[in-house]
Amino acid sequence: VDMMKEALEKLQLNIVEMKDENATLDGGDVLFTGREFFVGLSKRTNQRGAEILADTFKDYAVSTVPVVDTLHLKSFCSMAGPNLIAIGSSESAQKALK
């Protein structure tokens, strides 16, 4: 983690650290559309992690999506172009759509 932080600082990127030990947020559960965030609630990402993301990016809407029977939100969906999200046809993907 320290090496990654140093590399990002050298690139002069803003770094936001989650200080809440109860919060979890996995990159595979975060989908940014350019206008809003979708956060998958999974075994690796919890509600508190989604709340911290929302607090950090107040200019963007943050919506949570339950992720069941798969590892991450982005296991079954991804941005496929401007204003286009591709979603798989698996049972897990269809559950998340509802």
Image (tube, rainbow, N blue to C red):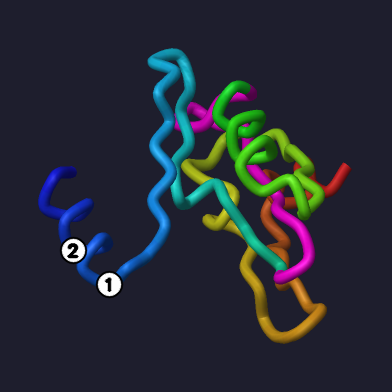
Farthest residue in the left direction?
3
Residue extending farthest right:
98
Image quarter of residue 36: bottom right
70 relative position to 6: left or right: right
Examine the structure image and report whether residue 18 is included in the region drawn in magenta. Answer: no
Q: Residue at 47% x, 42% y: name it.
A: 71
Identified by mark 2, the residue type is Ala
Residue placed under numbered mark 1 in the picture: 11
For the residues bearing labels 1 and 2, Cβ distance under 8 angstroms = yes
Nearer-the-camera pick, 1 or 93 = 1
- Looking at the image, which residue sits at the far bottom? 81
Residue 37 falls inside the magenta stretch: yes
Q: Percent position (x, y) of residue 94?
A: 78, 50
Q: Quadrant of residue 92?
A: top right
Q: Amino acid at mark 1?
A: Leu
Span shown in magenta: 34-47
Q: Residue at x 66, y 48 (%)?
A: 57
Q: Which quadrant is the C terminus positioned in?
A: top right
Q: Position of residue 76 (x, y in %)?
A: 61, 58
Dot 1, how many residues are within 10 Å of its Cα: few (below 14), some (14-19), or many (20+)?
Answer: few
Q: Residue at x 83, y 48 (%)?
A: 97
Residue 7's label in the rendered image is: 2
Q: Compared to 21, does 40 lie above or below?
A: below
